[in-house]
Amino acid sequence: MARHQINQTLNSVGIVTIEAQDGVEALKKLRQLSSDEGDNGAGVDMIISDIEMPEMDGYTFTRELRNDPEFSDSYVLLHTSLNGAINEDKATTCGANDILTKFVADELIKAVIKGLS
C-alpha cells in the first residue's frame, strides 16, 4: 500500500520511479538496469525502501546495496510505519542515509529533495 502511495506522490511531481515488491526483486531490477546501462548506479538518484518487506527486509537490502560497488554510494531513504529510536539506529547502522518514520507526502517530497541536492 505505502509503495503505491510513494510512487503516486513522486510521479505527481515529475519524478520517475521503478517499483519492486521486495528487496530481492529490487536488487534484481537495479542490477539489470546497471547491466543494461553499462553504468555504475544505472542513473539511479535515490533508492527508497520500506523496512518491513517479505523475502528481504529494508535493513538487509541496504546492507546489500552498500556491499555492491555499483550502488554503494547511492542515496538510500528507508521508510516505515514503526516509530522509535531503535529503528533509526538500525537504519543508520545498515548504511541508510535517512529514515522517514511515517508516510506523509510533504515529508516524503522534502526528504527526496534533500537526498537529490
Image (spheres, rainbow, N blue to C red):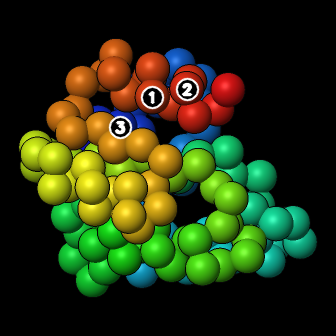
Amino acid under disc 2: Lys
In front: mark 3 or mark 2? 2
Image quadrant where residue 24 sits: bottom left
Residue 69, compared with residue 79, is above or below; it is below
What separation in Å lies between label 3 and label 2 (alpha carbons)? 16 Å
Image quadrant where residue 70 sits: bottom right
Q: Quadrant of the C terminus?
A: top right
Q: In this view, does 24 lie to the left or right of 36?
A: left
* Secondary structure type for disc 1: helix
**Residue 14: x %, y % from top left:** 59, 24
Visible residue check, residue 30: yes
Amino acid under disc 1: Ala
**Residue 59: x %, y % from top left:** 34, 69
Q: Is residue 101 left or right of residue 84?
A: right
**Residue 75: x %, y % from top left:** 59, 49
Q: What residue does disc 3 label?
A: 6
Q: What residue does disc 2 label?
A: 114
Q: Is residue 34 left or right of residue 71?
A: right
Amino acid under disc 3: Ile
Tag 1 near tag 2, CB within 8 Å: yes
Which of pointers 3 and 2 lies earlier in the amino acid sequence? 3
Tag 3 near tag 1, CB within 8 Å: no
x 46%, y 74%: residue: 63
x 45%, y 20%: residue: 110
Q: Toward the viewer: 75 or 49?
A: 75
Q: Toward the viewer: 102 or 73?
A: 73
Q: How crowded is mark 3: few (under 14 residues within 10 Å), some or many (20 or more)?
A: many
Q: What residue does disc 1 label?
A: 111
Q: Toward the viewer: 27 or 18?
A: 27
In front: mark 3 or mark 1? 1
What separation in Å lies between label 3 and label 1 (alpha carbons)? 12 Å
